Each structure stands twice: as C-alpha cells, then as structure tokens.
C-alpha cells in the first residue's frame, strides 16, 4: 500500500508539472490566453483516483503561488491566481476530481478496464469530459465577470471581442462569450481528445502501471478496492 501511495504521489507531482508545460502551448488573443491547460487536468482525472487527481492540480496551483513559472506565458506568483484567469485555474482541482470520478463510474458500468475501451466508449468519455470541465468554466466566468466590472480596459476588450457576433448589447452574454464560449471549441476538440488518447495509450502499453495508478474500476473488481487510497 505504501508503495502504491508513493507511486500515486509521484504521478500526481508529474502531472502537475505536465499541466504547467501544457500551459505554455498557448497564444494570447486577449487577457485570457488559449492554452492546452485542459489536457492537464483531464489527463490527471484519467490516470489517477479522484483524491490524487485533485491533489495533482492543487499542487499545480501551489507551485504557481510559490512563484514557479508554470502559468501560461511562463508566469507565476499569487497575482496570477488572483487575476482574470485565476477563476479558471481555481477550477482545475475540482475538474480533475470530477473527471476521475466519471471515469471510475463509467468503467464500473461498462465492466471493462480502461485499456479495453473502444472508440464508442472513448467518444462517450469525451462528451462526459465537458461535464468535468464545468467548474473551470463556471469559476472562470465568475472571476472574469469581477475583473470586467473592475477594469474598464477589460470591459472594452470584451465588447470588442464579441462585437462581430452582435452580442455586445447584452453585457452578461458578452462576458460569458468572451470568457467561456470562445474557448470551448478548442478545449473539446483539441485538449480533451489529446488527454483521452494519451491515457488510453498508456493503459494499453503499460496496463500494470495504469492499474497501479488508477486502479481497476470494473464492477466487482477487487483490484480497485486494493489499489485505492
């Protein structure tokens, strides 16, 4: 059990660092950059049990708060977590936990291991990954809304960003579009599929390693009960 715990702690630390590296695959079209961040917390949820997936992303936030340059654009410090993108980051631990819980529930219902899932199963998990990401979008919207009300330049950018879509007349809809809707296509079509494919490849290439980290979530699986914790 201690060996399993150490392995999960090491994997959680690695996935925190991976999330930070994925954050640098970004481009900035405004105050909130497009990044590959989502792949990090989805991957954590697919490779680790819920509490360890949560811990990996909490560690990621702690590393940023400590000043490590792991936020997008090689930035770090508490100011990053309190800025316009802080709400999104705050949702990462919850999103990773949700993704892990969704994975475990799906595997129990399917009565198959993750490596045994087919294309239809992966497509179902891809759709469910949008549910897992909900805390990121919700907290991102709330924090961004605060900053829009406090920063006239951010408000002006928001209205410009959605002006071509004819949404600038409704401020709440404009903020929702600029802070959430504009990012959903990239997240769901790039980040989440990438995480699913990587996790599935790991599970198939190294099933014993995957089971030691994530546990077996098949119905009645004794391996899950032994690997948890």
Image: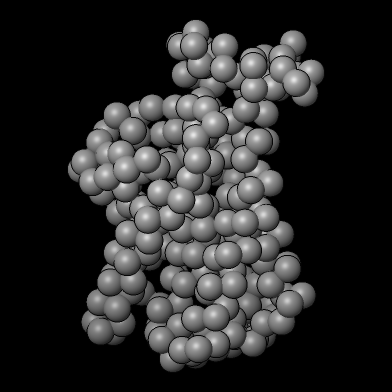
In the rendered image, is residue 224 in sight? Answer: no
Q: Is residue 162 left or right of residue 156?
A: right
Q: Is residue 133 left or right of residue 15?
A: right
Residue pictured at 33% horizontal, 52% vertical = 60
Taking the spot 54% from the left edge, 21% from the top edge, the residue there is 145
Residue at (46% x, 51% y) in the render: 25
- Rendered image quadrant of residue 132: bottom right
Q: How are the residues colored?
A: one colour
- 63 shown above or below 73: below
Which residue is at the front of the view, 116 or 109? 116
Q: Give percent across and percent down for residue 187.
A: 61, 50
Quarter holding the C terminus is: bottom left
Q: Is residue 4 left or right of residue 19?
A: left
Visible residue check, residue 70: yes
Q: Position of residue 214 (x, y in %)?
A: 45, 77
Residue 168's spot in the image, x, y percent? 72, 14
Q: Residue at x 73, y 67 (%)?
A: 124
Residue in the foreground of this view, choosing between 222 and 74: 74
Tell me where residue 176 sits by quadrant: top right
Question: Quadrant location of the N terminus?
Answer: bottom left
In the image, is residue 75 above or below residue 92?
above
Figure quadrant of residue 179:
top right
């Amino acid at each position: 059990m201690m060996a399993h715990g150490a392995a999960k702690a090491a994997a959680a630390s690695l996935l925190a660092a991976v999330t930070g590296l994925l954050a640098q695959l970004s481009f900035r079209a405004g105050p909130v950059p497009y990044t590959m961040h989502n792949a990090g917390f989805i991957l954590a949820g697919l490779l680790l049990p819920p509490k360890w997936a949560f811990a990996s992303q909490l560690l990621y936030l702690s590393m940023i708060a400590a000043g490590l340059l792991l936020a997008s654009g090689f930035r770090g410090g508490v100011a990053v977590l309190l800025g316009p993108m802080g709400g999104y980051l705050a949702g990462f631990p919850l999103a990773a936990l949700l993704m892990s819980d969704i994975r475990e529930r799906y595997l129990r219902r399917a009565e198959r291991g993750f490596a045994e899932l087919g294309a239809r199963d992966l497509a179902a998990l891809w759709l469910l990954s949008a549910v897992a990401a909900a805390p990121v979008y919700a907290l991102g919207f709330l924090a961004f809304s605060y900053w829009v009300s406090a920063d006239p330049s951010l408000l002006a950018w928001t209205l410009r960003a959605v002006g071509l879509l004819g949404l600038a007349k409704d401020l709440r809809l404009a903020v929702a579009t600029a802070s959430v809707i504009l990012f959903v296509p990239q997240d769901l079509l790039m980040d989440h599929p990438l995480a699913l494919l990587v996790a599935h490849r790991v599970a198939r290439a190294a099933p014993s390693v995957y089971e030691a980290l994530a546990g077996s979530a098949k119905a009645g699986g004794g391996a899950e009960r032994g690997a948890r914790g």
